[in-house]
Image (cartoon, rainbow, N blue to C red):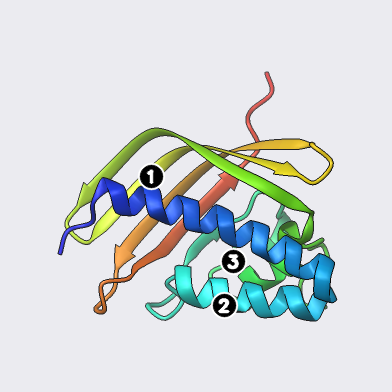
């Protein structure tokens, strides 16, 4: 069954809600709580069950810039992994609101891509706006899976 624009919208909302849930779990239950929520998010939303995910996080650099494995993605979201010592845990930064603005989408059957801006606000009102692209594939069960996730800070000329 082809992917719909509505499914892409729902996927972005779910991703934002998940980021907020990771942050709140960290505040309530520490790193173990955040890790448990983040593992659930990765299993529910990302396509690591289909193979490597083309994941380039916003705040990653050097040899650990790209995160094709679930372990690398988990570390990016919650940190506390000696294999990824530069990760501060993007998901545990107190996020409270996530919105997105679409630039363009591409849908071809069970594969879709989205590109635009994602704006995240933390509990202190600090706003981070990133350039983001997601690629999705619908799996055999009909679940939309993130198979490509690229995020970067806007270019500052």
Quadrant of res 98: top right
Quadrant of res 130: top right
Depth check, mark 2 against mark 3: the one in front is: 2
Dot 2 falls on a residue whose secondary structure is helix
Residue occupying the point 53% across, 60% down: 55
Please say whether residue 102 is visible from this viewpoint: yes
Is 8 rendered above or below residue 30?
above
* Residue 11 rendering spot, x and y as whole percentages: 42, 56
Residue occupying the point 70% across, 55% down: 60
Dot 3 falls on a residue whose secondary structure is loop
Give the spatial CA distance, label 2 vs label 3: 17 Å
* Residue 109 rendering spot, x and y as whole percentages: 17, 57
Depth check, mark 1 against mark 3: the one in front is: 1
Dot 1 falls on a residue whose secondary structure is strand
Q: Which mark is residue 30?
A: none
> Residue tagged by mark 2?
40
* Residue 121 rendering spot, x and y as whole percentages: 71, 41
> Residue tagged by mark 3?
67
Q: Which mark is residue 114?
A: 1
Sequence-wise, which precedes: disc 2 or disc 3?
2
Depth check, mark 1 against mark 2: the one in front is: 2
Q: Assign the N terminus to one quadrant of the image.
A: bottom left
Sequence-wise, which precedes: disc 1 or disc 2?
2
Residue occupying the point 32% across, 40% down: 105
Q: Residues within 10 Å of mark 3 (few under 14, many from 20)?
A: many
């Amino acid at each position: 069954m082809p992917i719909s624009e509505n499914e892409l919208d729902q996927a972005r909302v779910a991703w934002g809600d998940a980021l907020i849930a990771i942050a709140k779990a960290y505040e309530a239950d520490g790193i173990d709580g955040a890790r448990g929520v983040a593992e659930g998010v990765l299993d529910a939303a990302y396509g690591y069950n289909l193979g490597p995910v083309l994941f380039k996080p916003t705040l990653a650099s050097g040899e650990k810039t790209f995160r094709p494995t679930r372990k690398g993605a988990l570390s990016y979201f919650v940190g506390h992994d000696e294999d990824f010592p530069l990760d501060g845990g993007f998901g545990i930064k107190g996020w409270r609101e996530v919105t997105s603005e679409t630039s363009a989408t591409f849908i071809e059957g069970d594969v879709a891509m989205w590109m635009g801006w994602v704006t995240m606000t933390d509990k202190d009102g600090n706003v981070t706006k990133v350039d983001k692209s997601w690629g999705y594939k619908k799996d055999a069960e009909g679940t939309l899976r993130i198979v490509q996730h690229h995020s970067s800070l806007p270019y500052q000329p």
